[in-house]
Amino acid sequence: MRIWLCLLASPLLAQPDGAALFESRIRPLFEAKCLSCHSSGSQPIMGGLRLDSRAELLRGGSRGPSLVEGKPADSLLLKVVMHTAGPLKMPPGPKLKDAEIADLAQWVALGAPWGQSPLVTSKSQKEKHWSLKPVLNPAIPSVRKPAWVQSPIDAFILSALETKGLSPAPPADRRTLIRRATYDLTGLPPTPAEVEAFLNDKSPDAWPRLIDRLLASPRYGERWARHWLDVARYADSNGLDENLVYKNAFRYRDYVIAAFNKDKPYDQFLREQLAGDLLPPTGDLSTELERWTATGFLSLGAKMLAEDDPIKMQMDIVDEQLDTTAKAFMGLTVGCARCHDHKFDPISTAEYYALAGIFKSSHTMDHHKVVAKWHEYVLAPKPDRDRLAAHEARIEAERKRITELTSAQNKSLAAAAMRRVGAYLRAARLFEQSNRIQLAAAEKESEGIVLTTPTKTSEKPFLAEYTVQITRPGLYQLDLLNEEKGGGTADIYLNGVWQRQGLPPVQNRAASPESGGWSVALVLNLNAGANTIRFEHTRSIPKYGKILLTPHSSPEYPLSIVQAASRFDLNPGYLTQWIDYFDRSQAAPASPLYAWEILDRDAPLSAWANPVAKLFPSPLTTPDAIASHYEQLFLSALEQGKDSSDPGLKVLYTFLHEKFGPFRAPANVRRYYPEPLRDQIKAIESTVAELEKQTPDLPRAMGVREAAKAEDIPIHIRGSHWTLGKVVPRGFPNAIETAHRPAIANQSSGRLQLAEWLTQPDHPLTSRVMVNRLWRWHFGRGIVASVDNFGRLGDKPSHPELLDYLATRFVASGWSIKAIHRLLLLSSTYQMSSAYDSKAFETDPENISLWRMPRRRLEAESIRDGIMTASGGLRFDTGGSLLTYKDRQYVANTAKGSSVDYDRPIRSIYVPVLRSSLYDVFSAFDLPDPTMSNGDRDSTVVAPQALFMMNSSVMLNHSRILAETLLNTPNLEPSARIRLAYERALARPATNQEIDAALSFIASMQKEWNGDGKKAWQSFAKSLLASNEFIYLN
Amino acid sequence: MNPHWNTHLNRTLSRRDLLRVSSIGFPSLAFAALDPLAVKQPHFPARAKRVIFLFMHGGPSQVDTFDYKPLLKRDHGKPLPFARPKVVSGETFNLLQSPWAFKQYGQSGAWVSDLFPELAKCVDDICFVKSMHGSNSRHGGALLELHTGSDTFIRPSMGSWITYGLGSENNSMPGFVTICPTQSHGGANNFGSAFLPAPYAGTAIGAVGVPARDARIPFISNTETPRPIQRREIDYSQTLNRRQLELTGPDRALEGRIESFELAFRMQTEAPGLQNIEDESPLTKKLYGLDNPVTEDFGRQCLMARRLSEKGVRFVQVSHTYKWDQHQNLKRDHSQNAAEVDKPIAGLLRDLKSRGLLEDTLVLWAGEFGRTPTAEGSDGRDHNPEAFTIWMAGGGVKPGFSYGATDDYGYYSVEKKVHFHDLHATILHLLGLDHLKLTYRYAGRNFRLTDVHGNVVHDIIA
């Protein structure tokens, strides 16, 4: 602020000409620094703010007016350029010069005069980003060496290579090819027999037939579904805050595997995942269930299930769905636009909320309470589903009856007790005073009566009864001797009368041998003749080593709460809570019961800081008088109710009804219910239990359906639902153009229309993004390297025409993914070797122009599956779930890790993906974070991977199995066993030199292993599987 | 290896390649430029070289530990005389006084409750921040905020950022180690590297529920293969690798992988040694409370942390996992929790000090939030991200100092408020890193630990 104040004070500028200032300084500043984002031509208009007219400037954007005429200090425009408006700092990039800021300040101070001619910006006609332009069907380029061209793809690649003066690598040999294609398409190594057959197939179409065979294998879907699952951020648990099991997520996974195997057209695949529930019915049940399952795509995301703010939770889930959908199908990051207009891509905040409205109008969660519950479809015919719904409604109704009965009874119990506050006060005091006496535990059995064996025990109720003959009636101290665990918290009854609730933990003699081992329980008043002492427990029969009754000499003794309550005919539950209240309060001056609490304390009544104090005449001194006075006051408080005009009575009324006050429902409240009511509740409970047992166990799948109400939602300013802007109709971003834009009807969410819009043949992104993904998964790098980002911040395509060619072919083939596989794999490009060429390396070290086939590290699943296949241990069980958890159960939570059998030799795609507790093999080998959509994978080389090769159970088990396989194959020379090992692991025979080296290694290892030949072969197998050649594809 | 290839490699390195061959430490000179964990110079002279983070999972109560509130005692049982936050985790009742007495300790006169008798003797080395606040009232969100700065997106953990910024001083160990970490409330995301390259991720030793004496790095050893035999197996595999390399021509990944086996072998040798505390003197073990079953487990974690720090591991986290969440049984369970950590933490501070390590080791003690001064039920407190206390020691913070304040009851942080972002900015600053400059380019933009927030709290720096 100092800047313009100084300038205004300067005499030189005392009478500046506002219009001239605008033309000379302000107009150029706006045109150069502001208008590209803040004018009518901006795509989008950032923050809804336009600076191309004075009126617009005064109206402002989503943050309100940009300037206050004559008041630079109050103008947002100035704060923003001075970086004093919090995080909002403009323009992006370097801060304006002080002189420019001073000009602006002065101009505002002068009332912000405007000029005649419209403001223009050189950037107002910004060129459309390449990925948003229509897909063209490009001409196939001509090349100098047409002989190399087997497919149009080769023409695009070769022509680019030729421009750079490069030539393609020579073709790969057949062994390399079959290993490459088999891993690529099925994620597994070829068997030695498959290699042999391919080598011997001399027909010209051997290669295409190999590709067809691999594409037709069920193993293909198990490999390629995994790629899609990365994009779909697939996981079997929620992760994030509450890691609950997605027990039924596997159905979506199996759906994806099947979709790839049957080459489901991609447009259909997309429609089913976004709107399977809304597609026109076919009348076929299995189709309907499959489509529901497909919508699991929208539900699988990681969610904050324990978000306290339900609206924020809902919007977070919507955001996650929107972000995943946009990234997966369009390669766009739209998440940024939740809080501000996208800085780089053409998506405004308004357009974000237009899309968000679609997901907000869809039903993903059954509720958003903590812990929130995601929706699941019941995968069964309608009559079964109806029966299930009716059954669940019945259970709910029974539960409601229990709630009604208990709350009514709790209320009436409390109402009666509230009228007897005086007695509760006296009983609490009696309890406290009597317990100042400490009973010493028994030391000698000889002084009392020892009981060892119960006269009766039973289960349900769990009890142990001791009958004892007493000749001298009177007070007896009861001690327990516990020699084993258990029986700690039993209730004690004497002759059918309740004496004590629970017991303190009875000490265990074995644990503390220095003590006598006796624990005091209580003092009982025994009659002459037979007395029955009963111990009752809720879950097991109470067991004690011995029970000792010793005469208690003094008339004073510590009472149990139950005994104290019975003196006044009170409810021991409420009395417990009164005692608890006094214990916590410790005569706090704010306590309404202060006058009572200071009875045995050294505290002045004058310190009482509570309106109740006014209701106490000072001469009250005896406990009885105070208790009676309190009781009267509480009765008056009850009479006057919560709106009493007396502040003291109001406090007392509130006290009686406090949620955690002494008259809340006590623990185990049902023991105070009348017998018939207890029986009635028990009967309903057993009905509920019975009904629950009968609940049909129908298969379920996570999925999304239409919400009860479809609605447009307002812009959430800076992403917060506490600050709402204008409502935006549901729809699609304007900058992405298609000839046909499906209209969203008022009563539908718009998911179906979104899916239809995305699968328009002329949608510029859908086909490009998917063919680029397919390319990436074959060549290790996309034509657009940022496979998930086709926006301005993404990479530019290395071969733009090729990308469009593939996109065109994709749509023309009826969106067939297998057609694209064939197109790619039948090319010379794919069949190049990965041989090094120093000249090409010099020119293009990153191999962006594809002068050779890149060498690629196997992915996590292929490493595990490859090791298990080489050993012969892998089983091809398909589908289903390995999880032993129940749906929505907490997994890998504190205290225990997950209990998944990760070593089971099945394909890795069937191994559960538990978020935030990933299988360590997956996390070591770069499985992408399953909370985010990801079409790319890193291929790191880090030490933990080497540790896996050296020490993991997978490696140890399967190197052993491989050794056994080698040794158990009959009629083989040792050299042939080495050859077999190489064929199984590397798809090639060993050279003679390698055989000699291996045999001498094994021989020397056998000595190291003290003559154990199998161990020596295992060492060899380990070394081979750990080698670079095993985990890299040439 | 053909030296000619290396010349090539160094000239044509791209970030992508760096990523691809990134590994935990390359010792050979040729690869030094490739090593993502090579020691990097800070932006300005650092006060701290390394961090030990003592994480109290669950949310210790500030008003029962270090933030003494006499009015809470006076007004026990009264309603909270001001409004609660807009969004709270659950319903709480009237004010609840602390069951523990507070006393002043040391020359600094810091208030500490009876929960921490041992730590109380160390207050003159400690810098308390009593005005912490966060934005999320649930464990999951709050843990992620504390560890990564974001409760909305998956972001790199602060340990990852620091290791990315400074590298590691030990070429046989990862730069960021977390001992017995939680698997809930964000789990591995709390020590993950997100978009930063994998070597910056925290390496877990053990996991929650695993006793510290059994905690191990994944795949760190096997019981089947004697070490000399394993060495020979690796040698044989490396022979195959080198022969293949002759055929393929230069390939950074293949060469990097050869190195990675050597590093793994060193790590396998070094890590158990660092974990094995048997060579520590009986006096040291006693100092950490290893002679007492109550303190043995956490004491072992703290001692392991000192050993790792001493050997140049940049960021070591120790977790007292998910124990401090006393919605009920506050009296019983906070007593138990404090008893488990009090002696070990005091032992760690004393040990670091006597070894001269405290000077450049920053010790951070924090939970994910505090607790309400109002009662939940009759003997509990609910989550409270509006105010809580953390403390730091060593590494350039003012010793015997207290910063910031809460209101009369400790519900809101009111004076010199410090948000997680500010704490992160300050920790980076102590390590010689400017939080505005420590960036990583991802998805087209530069990311920071502090996102668009964070102010260094200069007042707590000595």
Image (spheres, coloured by chain):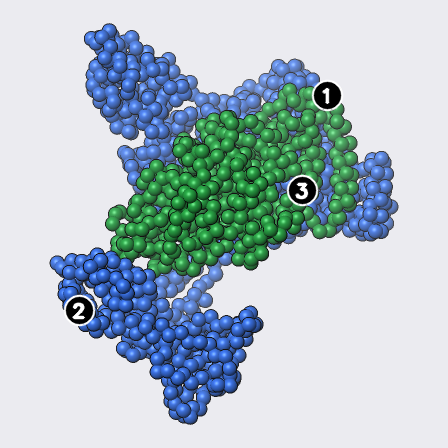
Q: Is residue A563 above or below residue B374?
A: below
Q: Is residue A59 left or right of residue A557?
A: left
- Residue A938 on image: x %, y %: 58, 34
Judging by the rendered image, the residue that carries numbered circle 1 is B4
Write down the residue under mark 2: A620
- Left or right of A76: which side holds A136? right
At 29% from the left and 79% from the top, the residue drawn is A567
Q: Which mark is residue B270?
A: 3
Percent of width and height locating residue B276 = 64, 48
The Cα–Cα distance between marks 1 and 3, rounded to whole angstroms, is 33 Å
The hue of chain A in the figure is blue
Chain in green on the image:
B
Give above or below for A628 relative to B143.
below
Residue extending furthest front? B107
Give the crowd class for mark 2: few <14, some 14-19, many >=20 residues within 10 Å.
few
Q: Residue at x 29, y 36 (%)?
A: A724
| A172 sits left or right of A890 in the view | right
Can residue A651 be seen here? The reply is no
Badge nearest the viewer, 1 or 3 = 3
The chain letter under disc 1 is B
Q: Which is in the foreground here, disc 2 or disc 3?
A: 2
Quarter that holds the C terminus of chain A: top right
Q: Amino acid at mark 3?
A: Glu
Q: Nearer the viewer, mark 2 or mark 1?
A: 2
The image shows residue B420 at horizontal and vertical percentages of: 41, 38
Q: CA distance from mark 2 to mark 1?
A: 103 Å
Which chain is home to disc 3? B
Pointer 2 indicates a residue of which chain? A
- Dot 1 amino acid type: His
